[in-house]
Image (cartoon, rainbow, N blue to C red):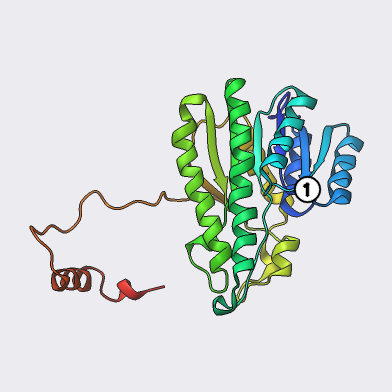
Amino acid sequence: MGILNNQAVVITGAGGGLGRSYALAAAAAGAAVVVNDIDRDRAHGVVAEIRASGGRAEPYVGSIANWDEAAAIVGQCVECFGAIDALVNNAAIMHMGDVLADTEADYRALVETNLLGSAFVGLHAARAMVGSGGGRIVNVTSTAHLGRSGTSAYAATKGAVSSLTYGWAVDLQGHGIKVNAIAPSARTPMLEANPIAGIDYSTLPSPDEIAPLAVYLMSDRVAFTGRVLRLEKRDLKVMNLPSFPERGVGRDTWTAEDVAEVLEQHLGERATEV
């Protein structure tokens, strides 16, 4: 009996990289899997792998950035397997380069796939989950949203996915839906095609090594919501939630000089650190 036995799940961008590993691991854990990708051969190839191992899977070839396609991805899971118990919003595109050379097309493509695509599939999944008593949504974000050279546009969309995770966790908690996120670190074709200076890719784990975290977050064993997690090499990490301290520095009224004095005193050089 696997941790996902009798569960039906959707994994977007599952034709390769992390998505493929998530799909194979979910099926091995007992789930019936809808394998979504925009590449027909890759989607059908992963489905064939799952079926060859005795698992259940169906392909859906289509773009998450299209509202109707996003609905159809979820609909296929419900139609084929009777419900959708979990979703992994894995599909994404990456863009790196000189921020001053970024174009409107770069930003639109990133927002439409990484943010709107995750939102579209997630909303359709949540509506279906409400009708069946609950479920789990796993978004995929990135530590790039903490600030990394050459990735500003990509990082902005992933930061938005983190915020979406926090918001959905609050909005959907009363419906029995838990929403968490993964900030993965792994050797993937997407990362290798967009190399980041200073990273030794030979030290990164394989996608298969990250998959157990996704499988757990898809399961009904999850007792928390609204968290971002990372499985990095041998370390499992839970991200601190962004927040302001409960108390700040008080003044009856503020001038710009007051602000400067307080920040220079309390932050010093840290105020300009990147």
Q: Nearer the viewer, residue 94 or 28?
A: 94
> Which residue occupies the extreme left position in the image?
252
* Percent coordinates x, y for residue 162 in the rendering: 51, 50
* Residue bearing the label numbered 1: 37
Q: Is residue 21 left or right of residue 97?
A: right
- In this rendering, the count of numbered labels is 1
Frontmost residue, 157 versus 16: 157
In the depicted structure, whether residue 85 falls above or below residue 164: above
Q: Is residue 37 visible?
A: yes
State which quarter of the image contains the C terminus. Answer: bottom left
Locate the N terminus and report the quarter of the image it occupies.
top right
On the picture, is 267 further left or further right than 192?
left
Q: Secondary structure at mark 1?
A: strand
* Residue at x 20%, y 51% (from the top left corner): 247
In the rendered structure, which amino acid carries the disc numbered 1?
A: Asp
Measured from the top left, where is residue 212 in percent x and y?
Answer: 67, 42
Other residues around mark 1 within 10 Å, as few (<14) / some (14–19) / many (≥20): many
Q: Is residue 192 above or below residue 11?
A: below
The part of the image, by quadrant, that contains residue 215 is top right
Q: Residue at x 17, y 71 (%)?
A: 256
Q: Position of residue 117 (x, y in %)?
A: 64, 48
Q: Is residue 65 left or right of residue 153?
A: right
Q: Looking at the picture, does residue 115 appear above or below residue 76? A: below
Residue 135, percent across and down?
Answer: 60, 28
Residue 219 placement: quadrant: top right
Q: Is residue 253 left or right of residue 210?
A: left
- Residue 31 visible from this viewpoint: no
In the displayed structure, 83 sits above or below 244; it is above
